[in-house]
Amino acid sequence: MQKVKFVTEEQDKIVVWCETNSIIVFRDFMQYILDNMNEPEKFMIIDTRNDLVYGMYCIATKQYEMRKRTFEERMNDVQTGKWNKYSNSELKGM
């Protein structure tokens, strides 16, 4: 399941509401933030079910050992960190 609810812009912040239970979507979204945002450490993940807020940058870099990819890695769809051990089909089975 993946549902994107809405996107709003509040002053200098953009708020994206998305629900997913796909680990692939979660991984790809974290990688997109690392690759494309100027200040990825400001990005927060909000768990509305448990009412918790996480720093996405810390989760991506410390827990999953992800990093910003080079241009060549992006073109070759290289996954960084702990994700590079698994194919998409393996992740679907998790």
Image (tube, rainbow, N blue to C red):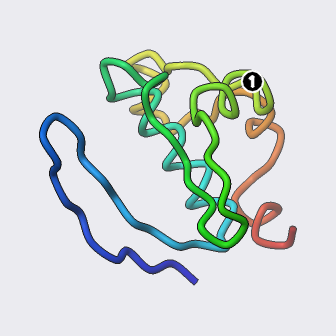
Q: Is residue 14 above or below residue 79?
A: below
The amino acid on which the numbered mark 1 sits, given as a three-letter code, is Glu
* Depth check, front residue: 16 or 70: 16
Residue at 76% x, 22% y is: 62
**Does 13 sit above or below residue 4?**
above
Q: Position of residue 10 (x, y in %)?
A: 17, 48
Along the line of sight, which residue is nearer the eye, 9 or 93? 9
Q: Is residue 87 above or below residue 89?
A: above
User: How many numbered badges does the structure rendering display?
Assistant: 1
Identify the residue position indicated by label 1 in the image. Answer: 65
Query: Which residue is at 52% across, 37% downward?
Result: 31
Residue projecting furthest to the right: 94
Where's residue 38, x and y in %?
30, 18
Q: Residues within 10 Å of mark 1 (few under 14, many from 20)?
A: few
Residue at the bottom extreme, as displayed: 1
Which residue is drawn at the image coordinates 15% and 51% (left, top)? Answer: 9
* Residue at screen point 69% across, 61% down: 23
User: In the rendered image, which quarter is residue 11 located in?
Assistant: top left
Instruction: Estimate the x, y position of residue 68 in percent, counting from the top left.
Output: 50, 19
Specify the quadrant that holds the N terminus: bottom right
Q: Is 18 displayed left or right of 10 in the figure?
A: right
Residue 85 at x, y percent in the picture = 83, 39
Specify the quadrant of the image occupied by residue 88: bottom right
65 left or right of 57 in image: right
Secondary element at tag 1: loop
Does 4 appear above or below 72? Answer: below
Left or right: where 5 falls relative to 69: left
Q: Quadrant of the C terminus?
A: bottom right
Horizontal side, residue 51 vs residue 25: left or right: right
